[in-house]
Image: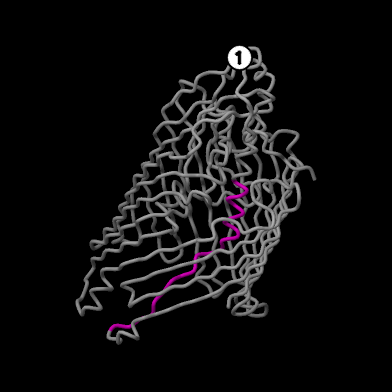
Amino acid sequence: MAARRRTLHRRVSPRATNAAARTLVIALTTVVLATPALAQDAALRERLQRLLDGEERPLVSPIAPGETTAERMYVDLGFTLREVFFNVNNPDSTSMRLWQTQADLYGYVSYAGAHQAYLRLNLDYRTYSPGDVLSDTQGQGQLAEPILAAAWYRFDWAAAQRIAGHAPGSNNARLTLGRQRVSIGAGLVLDDDLDAAVAELTLGSLEASLVGGVTPKHSTIDFDGSRPDFDTSTHRQFLAAQLRWQDNPALQPYFFVLAQLDDNDTKRAILNVGGVAVPTEFGYDSNYLGLGATGSFDESWVWALEGVYEWGTSTSNPFDYTTGDLMPPTRDHINAWAGVGSLTYLFNDEHDSKLHAWVMAGSGDTDRRSGNQTLGGNARNTTDQAFNAFGYVPTGYALAPGLANLLITRIGGSTRLGEAIGPSLRVGADAFLYAKLDADAGATIDTVRGQSFVGGAMDIFAKWHIAPDIELDLRYGMFVPGDAIPDQNDDVHHLVYLGVSYAF
């Protein structure tokens, strides 16, 4: 099938007269369709990486008090080999097919839990079908970034006190330095790999966290797909603080504040829009204040709730939506919000069965054609009301939109099949519904103005531990477009993922 090309990333000579600028009115339809497509490319890359990463390996140093110095040392070395086939048929007659061989080499060293170090190398060899979407930015037949997936050192004060023969009580302090996965709150505003320092302090039932870090520059996918090199050169700085109360399992409230500074190298570029050279400036500095809680009703019901307010400044769209004239960009205030809530029922049976329901939403902006990009983004001298952040919430395999201007519901469950097939075969399914909060506002996917219903989706997965060291991972996603999806993109969207892992 034909591949979608990133023409907006091509830099051209900065020649734009007023007459040429007015051709942007004619080219506006192209902009409306192309800019969310770039965002969807970014979402596709991000979803692909999430699927390939798998679950975080639990790190445990089983050291009992009173051991000798030699016995306090715990070393875990491992090697995981994964072969993956990934295919997605997009609703606009494009596709992507990927064969991947991924080798994870890791080493974990712990001295009685007081001093811990972890290193993981990701040798990720990917081959895309020639001409498929994303193959122009993800090199053919070469190792993908990042090779250094994680590298950190951690000091645990309570464990050090135990080594010294002191009872640490209910207080503790931990410091982790290096490349690591950092998540704030429910992961709505930040859930990504950072080169960071994370300090955690526990005082009785109060847990405080401080985070300072930057994105790994050459391996982070940015949310603004209209910025050149958004998926190969991203540099953003983060500073966050979080407080959580943990004394009551039925109610554990928390709040956090996070500041993000745009330090990307590309601040200005000339973009080709409908054959017209469009000078474009980039910049998105944002702050987030979040309030949430987790808890349970009894042994069966578990719930979580989080609301976020976003403020800061963003850079406006480079031309006037009405006339098509090129306009000097403005730095505009951000006033946005998002929320997520979930309710899970645990059957507490031998199959570890569970059902869950999620609701996710984020504010949108009526004058935005694209919910998350500068080109086709916020109109100059207006408040930017579209929510954008750096986290991850489960919005589906086949579509995976950002939350800007969307209301998303998710209902599903999972169970482990019986002994006749094998106790390690876990299967599950999720159903999704997507709708725009404002029918006239843009989203992070291509939508029609004036229509609200985006569509529905179904995800199915099966994870089978065929043997203690071999796992089969099968996932399928299907998206059925609604009235808000343009006619040229209204084919059913399929995603197929098959992975086989062998752990040495």
Q: Is residue 49 magenta?
A: yes
Tally of numbered tags: 1
Q: Is residue 132 magenta?
A: no
**In this view, which residue lies farthest toward the left?**
166
Residue underneath mark 1: 323
Estimate the x, y position of residue 162 in percent, counting from the top left: 25, 77
Q: Is residue 353 above or below residue 112?
A: above
**In this view, which residue lies farthest toward the top?**
19
Q: Which residue sits at x=74%, y=40%?
A: 92
Task: Name the image quarter holding residue 426.
Answer: bottom right
Q: Is residue 434 above or below residue 165?
A: above
Task: Name the image quarter holding residue 99.
Answer: bottom right
Q: Which residue sits at x=66%, y=58%?
A: 126
Q: Nearer the viewer, residue 482 or 322?
A: 322
Instruction: Tell me which amino acid carries mark 1.
Output: Thr
Quadrant, the C terminus: bottom right
Estimate the x, y position of residue 215 in percent, counting from the top left: 45, 49
Estimate the x, y position of residue 144 in percent, counting from the top left: 60, 56
Q: Which residue sits at x=57%, y=49%?
A: 395
Task: Name the image quarter holding residue 313.
Answer: top left
What element does badge 1 sit on? loop
Give, as a single range, the part of the protein colored magenta: 43-65
Estimate the x, y position of residue 421 in percent, counting from the top left: 67, 77
Quadrant, the N terminus: top right
Colour scheme: one colour
